[in-house]
Amino acid sequence: MKKFLSMLLLFGGFAYSQNGIPTDYFSNPLNINMVLAGNFGEMRANHFHSGLDIKTEQREGLPVYAPANGYVSRINVQHYGYGKALYILHPNGYTTVYGHLRSFAGDIEKYAKDTQYAKETFEIELFPEKTLLPVKKGDLIAYTGNTGGSGGPHLHFEIRDSSQRPMNPLLFGIEIPDSKKPIVSAVFAYPTGEDAHVNQSQNRTKLRLIKQKDGTYKTESLTAYGKIGFGITTFDQQDGASNKNGSYKINTQFNGTEKFEVLFNKFAFSETRYLNRYTDYNYYETNKSMVQKLFREPNNPLSIITKEDDNGYITVNDSLSSIYTIDVSDFKGNTMQVSIPIEGKKMEILDPKKVEKTADYIYADHATSITKGKFSIYIPANSLYEDTYLDIKDEGDILKFHEDVIPIHSNISITADISNYHESDKDKLYIGRLNYKGLPLYTSTTRNGDKLTAKIRTFGSYTVAIDTTPPTVKPVNFAEGKWISHQNFLKVKITDDLSGISSYRGTINGKFILMEYDYKKDVLTYNFNDNINLETENNFKLIVIDNVGNSATFEAKFFRKHP
């Protein structure tokens, strides 16, 4: 890499799309054909995907190249999320992002590792000066990996605008072969209002899809009246992969009039959790299938909704026939259509809207405090998207806080009184959410005297749990008193079955060593190429602390010859 001044060039000659986005500026960051495991905007748990997940042939260590001139503006290394991530700011104002890396390359890797050793920590976030780490198009910047929350080896690649809003990389001329039409697997109708119904029901109604000779779909004719919304379960597949990725555009029409359009070109990170308002959260939690609601409900500010008439709802009148159509398109313009014939008829409602009333009715725009036994709950205003009844019960040390069928947008606080616990145990207590086996999963908990408080964003059952057991530490590829000259790495397995691992620190001969934590495998790894240890006889020491302060210390002696 050369000095930053040497890369300030005039960028005339680049192609631009009609909306001013450069389409011949960024090249492929990998030297392989681009096949996607995930695309821009597809729906994940609690968020929209902000980039492309590029397959790396089930391998780690593929070279990543700078797709354009720029400089490293941010380096972020964390155990979770993007794992090892790199950010490059380009002269045209866009930022490219690379996530789940195995390692950085060259001066970038040295700068990051030097800082990790100086701070004696694996997790770092750095914002280098623009003259420190310049890159030119085609420079080697990193190697692909599987770090952080990655479910398998791949490169997460983003392009962000000058306001750090992720944009669809396909807008920039990045080519992904795609000759397949989107697939539609389910369509639903949602009656809205006291007298609205679909097939004499006021509840969500699944419509039967009938495939037509031309490949499109038509649903069974439905009888309806009043204000109705529709929802769809759909996905797209690109050539060369079987992954179920997201659609690019959904457009609806009612009797030829455009009603609603969703377009996955750009969104802000502040919007992304509103996915839980845009989708049918209840259906997802009970059926594990995402339904996109093709109408805008209150408290849904998503900018991906680019067109709407009456918030996407239709009004079906008595004695009138009508047609509602849904067109689902991918970025290449491959389109699948669903037609829904509707007969307007006001009929007796045989399946009225189901509302389970409880003693606790929450107004979404008001803050609410509730006490149940030893538990106090504080629900800030706008933590919920709409007014609703909540089913809340206490059973001693367990708080049954509704079912996870309603989304929580912002944190709700649960506080537990622990005054009846023995003083020596209080520092070992935490609030945990019970899993399907009835075991508590640690929730970040703070203690103030006899009060434990946790902030939660998921309904379910919570309990006061205790953890008095320290973590366990086991060597993976070495043993006490043995020679390990042939090993390139020192590996240790660390586990904690209750509150979970909080921190760790390793040393050799009293010197800090950088150990990378793979939480998916419960393994800490030290690379001997760091050259921190220069002895033949080495004393290794590792201290591991869990989330309530229990600690385990592991010590071992090993021998190693140096090249």
Image: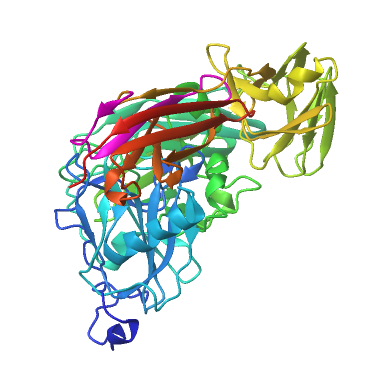
Q: Is residue 481 magenta?
A: yes
Q: How many numbered marks have been drawn onto this rendered protein structure?
A: 0
* Numbered range of the magenta stretch: 480-499
Q: Is residue 194 left or right of residue 51?
A: right
Q: Is residue 11 above or below residue 348?
A: below
Residue placed at 48% from the left, 54% from the top? 124
Q: Is residue 490 above or below residue 169?
A: above
Q: Is residue 357 left or right of residue 5?
A: right
- Residue 144 visible: yes
Residue placed at 21% from the left, 62% from the top? 28
Q: Is residue 78 magenta?
A: no
Which of the 4 image quadrants contains residue 370? top right
Residue 487: x %, y % from top left? 22, 36
Residue 73: x %, y % from top left? 43, 68
Which of the 4 image quadrants contains residue 540? top left
Q: Is residue 295 left or right of residue 340?
A: right
Residue 345: x %, y % from top left? 55, 30
- Residue 405 visible: no
Q: Viewer-proximal residue, 43 or 211?
A: 43
Residue 476: x %, y % from top left? 31, 25
Q: How is the image coloured?
A: rainbow
Q: Viewer-proximal residue, 509 or 296?
A: 509
Q: Quadrant of the N terminus?
A: bottom left
